[in-house]
Image (cartoon, rainbow, N blue to C red):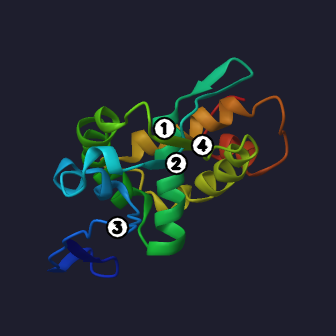
Amino acid sequence: LPKYDFSTNHVTSYETFTPGPNDVYIFEGIQAMYPEVMELFPTDATRRLFVTIHSDIIASGVEIDKAKLRLIRRIVRDFQFRAADPAFTLSLWHNVRANEIQNIMPNIRPEDIVVDTLLPYEVYLLSRRLVALAPEMPPDDEFAGQFTALCDLLLNHYRYAFRRNVLFEYSKKYGRSN
């Protein structure tokens, strides 16, 4: 199994892993669902727990799908806890999403447990943090359009509920309609 150092963004080493017949193992992270990892465990003896955003949100006629919500979470988390600017996180997203589609979603079985971690108020909290990161995104960056689209999506999502907050200030500064 790889050991990853988030401060350097590199795998630092690998460790051999052999599960015992009566052991309980908890793996965290997207790599835990790789087929190569799951092959280590007998299918009839495993229960898998997926903890993720599993729902879309629709409000004021605006839909935000679960993949975009996961991306927004990731951008905010990476900036706050990993010192990664939005452009860096967006540069990784295509591969993260492709991995999710190829290795994670097809491996969810009916007997697995899926815990939807989306909280309805979370989108508002994340939106404030995401839009506040606008100064961290250079306008000429190749991912600036994608970042702006996410901010606009959140702005449209909350256009009726919030008039004088960071989202409204973003719309005035960057010329977005509300």
Q: CA distance from mark 1 to mark 4?
A: 21 Å
Element assignment for label 4: loop
Residue 149 seen by the camera: no
Q: Which mark is residue 171?
A: none
Q: Are marks 2 and 1 in contact (CB under 8 Å)?
A: yes
Instruction: Look at the picture and state if 54 lies above or below 134.
Output: above
- The spot of residue 125 in percent (x, y) is 71, 52
Q: CA distance from mark 3 to mark 4?
A: 58 Å
Of marks 3 and 1, the one in the foreground: 3
Q: CA distance from mark 3 to mark 1?
A: 39 Å
Q: Which mark is residue 68?
A: 1
Q: Which one is earlier in the sequence, the residue at label 3 or at label 4?
A: 3
* Residue at screen point 67% across, 29% down: 156
Image quadrant occupied by the N terminus: bottom left
Callout 3, which amino acid?
Asn
Q: Which mark is residue 22?
A: 3
Quadrant in which residue 16 is drawn = bottom left
- The spot of residue 161 in percent (x, y) is 84, 34
Callout 4, which amino acid?
Tyr
Category of crowding for the residue at label 2, using alpha-carbon neighbours closer than 10 angstroms: few (below 14), some (14–19), many (at least 20) = many
- The spot of residue 74 in percent (x, y) is 47, 55
Residue, disc 2 = 72
Residue farthest to the front, as pictured:
22
Instruction: Look at the picture and state if 62 lies above or below 90.
Output: above
